[in-house]
Amino acid sequence: MKKNWKKVLLLGLLTVLTVGTLAACGSTGLDSGSSGSSAKTSKKASKDLKVGVSLSTLSNPFFVQVRSGISTLAKSKGTNIQVSDAQNDTAKQNNDIEDLIQKKVDVLIINPVDSSAITPAVKDANEAGIPVIAVDRSSDGGKVLTLVASNSTKGGEMAADYMIKKLGQNAKVAELQGIPGASATRERQKGFDNAVKGKLDLVTKQTAGFDRAKGLTTTENILQAHPDIVGIFSQNDEMALGAIQAVKASGKKITIVGFDGEAGAIKAIKAGTMSATVAQQPEKMGRLALQAAFDHFDGKKVKTNIESPLQLVTSDNVK
């Protein structure tokens, strides 16, 4: 009996030692308390960091400004960054991220094309011990250190409140939606749809993929099917700028509200062809994302959500 107890104790001790050894192996990421990884590493100066950046598209001025914010701060700190353009292709983005993982970057800053489709890449980064910072759109799976984004639900509500005041009760409106799998699409829709319920008549919601050309063609289709609409909420400014072309060709007068605050939208508001936009600060968003990486590798605690401010821009305050 004593021999059996000795065997049990010996096996238990070996198990504890094995688990402890495995836990210590492959520890390559700082744990800030909000990180998706419990692994730890030594601090790293900003000038010694290799930062991989994957953006959904660089065809959209909004994400060009996000890149600018990252690049400007990186240059001032002597940080090495590698930027890839997913061209709104989920497969390409996942491949780009796998390539950055193979290059052994210290941290990944990702703006997902699709919040669900990005999950495998985020999990691969987790397994490699590389912290992930999400920008503008979240990841549905895997663990991220932080999400740097505006409150898209609140932004949708801001757009709705403006349209209700401008158009009055039960006015017929349409909604141009972004990429179906993007968190920003879901959140802006949630904010807008809930706020207009019982106040505006939302006659149709159609996807235009955050794309200007699709915004034009989709709006043309909407105007043919619903010629009596008086307002359009577009979940980004690129689709709104496409909608402006369709509305102009139709000869109708329609209130168009966008989202982002990009230069083209501001110009359109000044010209009177667009009524308003919920303006984000994409350049600041990029800076906040990279600063979160610096703070993480400096051993500071990083919040799980870093909110970038919003402002409703209309003809009254556009100047």
Image (cartoon, helix red, strand yellow):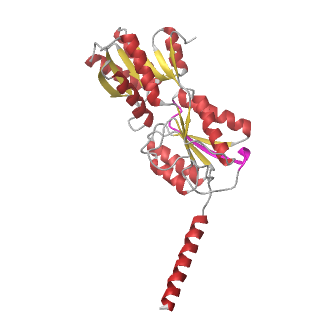
Work out whether residue 128 or residue 82 is closer to the camera in this orientation and state it: 128
Residue 248 seen in the figure: no
Kindly give the residue lying farthest to the left in the view shown. 225
Horizontal and vertical percent position of residue 189 = 38, 29
Q: Is residue 67 above or below residue 35?
A: above
- Total marks placed: 0
Kindly give the residue lying farthest to the front in the view shown. 2
Horizontal and vertical percent position of residue 234 = 41, 23
Q: Is residue 112 above or below residue 167?
A: below
Horizontal and vertical percent position of residue 241 = 45, 19
Q: Quadrant of the C terminus?
A: top right
Q: Which range of residues does the magenta coloring cover? A: 44-59
Apparent side of residue 251 relative to residue 83 in the rendered image (left or right): left
Horizontal and vertical percent position of residue 288 = 62, 35
Residue 150 seen in the figure: yes
Q: Is residue 56 magenta?
A: yes
Q: Is residue 184 magenta?
A: no
Work out whether residue 232 or residue 271 is closer to the camera in this orientation and state it: 232
Q: Is residue 120 above or below residue 194?
A: below
Apparent side of residue 267 relative to residue 239 in the rendered image (left or right): right
Q: Is residue 139 above or below residue 261?
A: below
Query: Which quadrant of the view contains residue 294?
Result: top right
